[in-house]
Image (cartoon, rainbow, N blue to C red):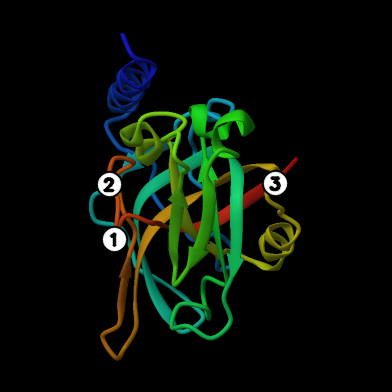
């Protein structure tokens, strides 16, 4: 059985465990600091498939003049394939950095270093040479993504500023939807299987470390 299918089954078992132990997924809660608390999730597999638990209705909270609604609890440990910082686009006020991240075989330098990886316009691009992709394209898609990061506080922002390509990062937070009073809207993907427009994750990050 392929490894990705084993991981999918594991996530399904975890969801059943949460349902059996109380019936409710992790619930967003605003702490005493006024920031959204981190979700309670198991530690993600080292450089393995991200953990995600989708939510139903969740309270909206405000960050830098924007309304954020949590969509799912999220945690991962992944390799940094590339980073891109933004200062002037519409999302920069809340998400100043994108990380292109890889997990499973896309965390292996012997694999991803065969790709020409770039980021621009909030997209993540990869190309390969005449020899073809190092692993099947569907596996590249489900094992890597461009992620827009919304630091929860100054400590997370400082930790994000230290992240460099080639490192591994651990993060925990919430996939979110963002909107403002003028009607602008930015919504996270909730799938690791998608590609193209709308496929990036938008993450409110309350814990982040790198090594």
Q: Is residue 37 visible?
A: no
Task: Give coordinates of residue 13: x percent, y percent.
Answer: 32, 19
Q: Residue at coordinates 32% horizontally, 23% vertically from top-left?
A: 8
Determine whether 143 is above or below 4 in the image: below
Count residues near mark 1 (Cα–Cα under 10 Å), then give few for <14, some for 14-19, many for 20+: some
**Left/right of residue 158 with respect to residue 172 in the rendered view:** right
Q: Which is more foreground, mark 2 or mark 3? A: 2
Question: Mark 3 — residue?
Answer: 209
Say which of 185 and 100 sits in front: 100
Say which of 26 and 178 sits in front: 178
Query: Could you tell me how far apart the alpha carbons at marks 2 and 3 are, in whole angstroms?
Result: 26 Å
Q: Is residue 111 visible?
A: yes
Question: Mark 2 — residue?
Answer: 194
Q: Mark 1 and mark 2 in contact (Cβ < 8 Å)?
A: yes
Q: Residue furthest bottom?
A: 182
The disc, 3 or 1, on the residue closer to the chain's N-terminal end is 1
Please, what secondary structure does the residue beneath circle 3 have?
Answer: strand
**Left/right of residue 164 with respect to residue 37 in the rendered view:** right
Q: Residue at coordinates 47% horizontally, 42% vertically from top-left?
A: 129
Count residues near mark 2 (Cα–Cα under 10 Å), then give few for <14, some for 14-19, many for 20+: some
Question: Mark 1 — residue?
Answer: 198
Please, what secondary structure does the residue beneath circle 2 have?
Answer: loop
The disc, 2 or 3, on the residue closer to the chain's N-terminal end is 2
């Amino acid at each position: 059985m392929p490894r990705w299918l084993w991981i999918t089954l594991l996530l399904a078992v975890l969801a059943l465990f949460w349902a059996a132990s109380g019936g409710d997924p992790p619930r967003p809660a605003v702490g005493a600091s006024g920031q959204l608390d981190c979700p309670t999730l198991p530690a993600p597999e080292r450089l393995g498939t991200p953990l995600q638990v989708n939510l139903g209705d969740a309270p909206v909270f405000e960050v830098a003049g924007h309304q954020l609604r949590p969509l799912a609890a999220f945690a991962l440990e992944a390799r940094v394939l590339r980073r891109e910082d933004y200062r002037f686009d519409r999302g920069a006020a809340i998400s100043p950095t994108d990380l292109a991240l890889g997990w499973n075989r896309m965390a292996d330098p012997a694999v991803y270093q065969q790709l020409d990886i770039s980021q621009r316009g909030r997209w993540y691009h990869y190309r390969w040479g005449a020899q073809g992709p190092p692993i099947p394209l569907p596996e590249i898609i489900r094992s890597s993504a461009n992620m827009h990061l919304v630091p929860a506080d100054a400590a997370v922002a400082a930790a994000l500023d230290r992240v460099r390509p080639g490192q591994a990062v651990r993060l925990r937070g919430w996939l979110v939807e963002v909107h403002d009073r003028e009607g602008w809207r930015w919504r996270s993907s909730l799938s690791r299987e998608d590609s193209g427009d709308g496929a990036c994750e938008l993450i409110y990050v309350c814990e982040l470390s790198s090594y």
